[in-house]
Image: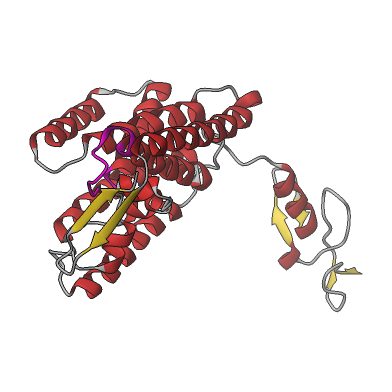
Amino acid sequence: MAPCTWHPARATPLSCSRCGRPACPECLTPASVGFHCRECVAQGQAASRAPRTIAGARLGTKPVVTIALIVVNLAFFLITAVQARSGMDLSNSGLFLRGGLIPAEVASGEYWRLLTAGFLHGNLIHLATNMLSLYWLGIPLERILGRGRMLTIYLLSLLGSSVAVLLFSAPVSLTIGASGAVYGLMGALLATFRRLKLDLRPLAVVLALNVFITFSVPGLSWQGHLGGFVVGAIVGAAMVFPRRESRRAWQWGVSAGLVLVLGVLTAIAGDQIGSWHCLYQVAGQVSCVPTH
């Protein structure tokens, strides 16, 4: 009988079959051969590598980012609804007008609109549609890519959507909504399905349906949808196609490169649009005139 290494007051005839230290039954764990003490078990767990996905994420990661993005979108909508005192007409909200994507205002220096516009929605139906799409696409994508990669794709797709609006939309126009970022998730999921050699037909049908809706329903921004999809597909491919040895370099190198490219395109679009002066009326109307 010897005192347990972790409980000196307990005498025990048992010992760890790996390190030989005496241990009481509470401190021993059955192993393939004999019993291992708590310290040897901890060392073994630390040494073993957790299984990874094709993108380098740990298997079994809970989709926290997708839920957090939905919560942020809901918070933005709640603020605008309270300001406008309506859930269906938010045009009187100060956040709605000061955060929506108006190319003329971005060209005049209000660059925060490139991001804030992606968290604003016109009404409750608009919000519900985008949040359901975000949930359906984001949950499986985050499980495969991991939290950081998922957030990177979402934000870059949102930025790509906004830059496309700057380049191809009228200077005095208002664009809002998370659909550009959602299209980016769709592009990334398409690349992921291709890498995993899964059946692309169900996702292709969903994509075709969304493209049809984009061009058939008035008021939807095809520019934002196209920009988000292209950026999301590029980043998504960079996340899943490189080999493990060079995976991180490709993932973050392509992401950083896209930030640079989108920044240059923003500067080019701003130079083309020029400087404007905009006035906001009580009814939510915006009037802008060029200052050059």
Q: Is residue 292 above or below residue 94?
A: above
- Please state if 168 lies on the left or on the right of 218 as rendered: right
* 162 inside magenta stretch: no
- Res. 199 image quadrant: top left
Q: Residue at x 79, y 52 (%)?
A: 40
Image quadrant containing the C terminus: top left
Residue 145 x, y percent position in the rendering? 48, 39
Q: Residue at x 84, y 58 (%)?
A: 15
* 171 inside magenta stretch: yes
Residue 2 x, y percent position in the rendering? 91, 68
Residue 70 can be seen in this image:
yes
Residue lying at the far bottom of the rendered structure? 9
Look at the image and give the residue range highlighted in magenta. Answer: 165-179
Image quadrant containing the N terminus: bottom right
Q: Residue at x 18, y 63 (%)?
A: 284
Residue lying at the far front of the rendered structure? 292
Main SS type for the magenta part? loop
- Res. 9 image quadrant: bottom right
In front here: 138 or 37? 138
Residue 176 can be seen in this image:
no
